[in-house]
Image: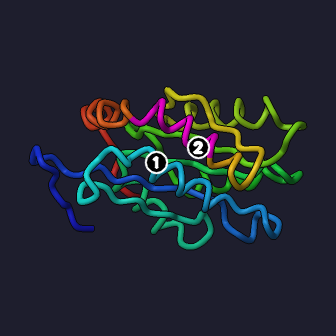
């Protein structure tokens, strides 16, 4: 992967959005659009030449997924909680992603309201931390599509966006594992 340099000479931040294998989720329960929207919004303060947002599906190619994680400073892990097997699907995605040590991670949960209102975000945060991720922000739980979902993403990212460059700087000081 190329290594573009930012204005200060440091490698430009790379954001990867990790989404479950489409075969692991029911039709219409995908999270790629919401995850990508969060990834773009979190990095929108960076000059466009200094940001790259990649979307990596869990089942596409485990090696490609691990390479995306290894190349990324910021990860957005987006999971749907609107069906009974959501934990299994999320677990497979995180297993395929490999270690998350040294990565700034933002979680996004879609659907599952009201049954998973507290459980899904809490589970995802705990699972990401268990795997070594730096999760300072609470998981964003989107319960609506369209304008309401966009408003929630905008509010969340407006709050957390100013911290992204500092979080990336801190994460880069930590030892980061190579792709396996």
Helix, strand or loop at label 2? It is helix
Range covered by the magenta-colored residues: 151-161
Q: Is residue 176 left or right of residue 66?
A: left
Q: Which mark is first along the chain, 2 or 1?
A: 1
Q: Is residue 155 magenta?
A: yes
Residue located at (47% from left, 67% from top): 63
Which image quadrant for residue 21? bottom right
To which residue does mark 1 refer?
A: 41
To which residue does mark 2 refer?
A: 153
User: Is the residue marked by circle 1 packed among few (<14), some (14-19), or many (20+) residues within 10 Å?
Assistant: some
Q: Nearer the viewer, residue 131 or 164?
A: 164
The answer to whether residue 87 of the structure is visible from this angle is no
Q: Is residue 80 left or right of residue 76?
A: right
Which image quadrant for residue 145? bottom right
Q: Position of residue 122 (x, y in %)?
A: 71, 29
Residue located at (37% from left, 30% from top): 163
Q: Position of residue 108 (x, y in %)?
A: 63, 44
Q: Quadrant of the N terminus?
A: bottom left
Residues at circles 1 and 2 in contact by the CB criterion of under 8 Å: yes
Q: Is residue 84 magenta?
A: no
Q: Nearer the viewer, residue 106 or 177?
A: 106
Helix, strand or loop at label 1? It is helix
Q: How many marks?
A: 2
Q: Position of residue 141 (x, y in %)?
A: 70, 39
């Amino acid at each position: 992967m190329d290594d573009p340099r930012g204005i200060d000479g440091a490698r430009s931040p790379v954001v990867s959005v990790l989404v479950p294998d489409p075969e692991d989720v029911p039709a219409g329960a995908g999270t790629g659009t919401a995850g990508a929207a969060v990834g773009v919004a979190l990095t929108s303060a960076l000059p466009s030449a200094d940001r790259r947002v990649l979307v990596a599906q869990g089942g596409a190619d485990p090696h490609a997924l691990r390479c995306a994680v290894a190349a990324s400073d910021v990860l957005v892990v987006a999971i749907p909680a609107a069906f009974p097997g959501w934990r299994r699907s999320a677990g497979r995605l995180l297993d395929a992603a490999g270690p998350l040590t040294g990565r700034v991670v933002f979680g996004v949960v879609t659907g599952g309201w009201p049954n998973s209102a507290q459980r899904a975000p809490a589970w995802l945060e705990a699972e990401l931390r268990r795997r070594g991720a730096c999760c300072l922000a609470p998981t964003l739980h989107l319960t609506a599509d369209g304008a309401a979902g966009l408003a929630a993403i905008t509010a969340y990212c407006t709050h957390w966006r100013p911290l992204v460059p500092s979080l990336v700087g801190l994460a880069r000081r930590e030892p980061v594992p190579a792709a396996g």
